[in-house]
Image: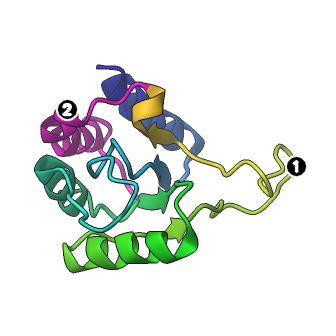
Amino acid sequence: MDLINAISNAYCKAHDRKWNKIYILLDIHGTIAESNYDNKKIVFYRHAITALRICKFKEIRIIIWSSCYPKDIKKYVRMLKRQGVRVDAVNRSMEKNNRTGDFRKKPYFSIIIDDKAGFDHNDWHRVSAIFADERRRLIYVH
């Protein structure tokens, strides 16, 4: 599972560079919810919600990354919040431009969780454990 390496690399890089945040770029359709583009009935994958709810570590920032229309994204964000999932941003970088990068068009992220990037929603049951293991392994300190 490539996500194990992505999470491990994100924590290692953050630890080595003394960064205090891990940014997750998170897709909606086919990743945390069934691909239902009419948006009449939203069905979240059970393990996705559980994993995202558990991953409320202080260093993690979740950025929803979706091509949905704004009214639909608002609906998803409201539903995620009701499910106990914190969403920190939508379709934007949380980092400001700096000497090494321009984040006006490409958001900064540590990890991308998207079915188009190879993520299989059947792997959600492992995600929270992977985050917890990497955190413990590096004794990640804010």
Q: Is residue 99 magenta?
A: no
Is the residue 110 above or below the residue 23 in the image? Answer: above
59 vs 40, left or right, is right
| Quarter of the figure with residue 50 | bottom left
What residue is disc 1 on? 99
Q: Nearer the viewer, residue 99 or 46?
A: 46
Q: CA distance from mark 1 to mark 2?
A: 36 Å
Q: Which mark is residue 123?
A: 2
* Magenta part of the chain: 118-142
Q: Nearer the viewer, residue 121 or 100?
A: 121
Categorize mark 2 by other alpha carbons within 10 Å: few (<14), some (14-19), many (20+): few
Q: Which mark is residue 126?
A: none
**SS at mark 1?**
loop
Q: Main secondary structure of the magenta part?
A: helix
Q: Is residue 133 magenta?
A: yes
Amino acid carrying mark 1 in the image: Arg
Point out the frontmost of discs 1 and 2: 2
Q: Position of residue 103 (x, y in %)?
A: 77, 53
Q: Position of residue 96 (x, y in %)?
A: 75, 63
| Quarter of the figure with residue 75 | bottom left
**SS at mark 2?**
helix
Q: Name the N-terminal-most of marks 1 and 2.
A: 1
Is the residue 142 above or below the residue 119 in the image? Answer: below
| Residue contact between numbered discs 1 and 2, judged by CB atoms under 8 Å | no
Q: Quadrant of the N terminus?
A: top left
Give the mark count. Answer: 2
54 vs 112, left or right, is left
Q: Position of residue 61 (x, y in %)?
A: 45, 61
The structure residue drawn at horizontal position 28% and vertical position 37%, both measured from the top left corner, is 134
The structure residue drawn at horizontal position 83% and vertical position 54%, both measured from the top left corner, is 98
The structure residue drawn at horizontal position 83% and vertical position 43%, both measured from the top left corner, is 100
Is the residue 81 above or below the residue 123 in the image? Answer: below
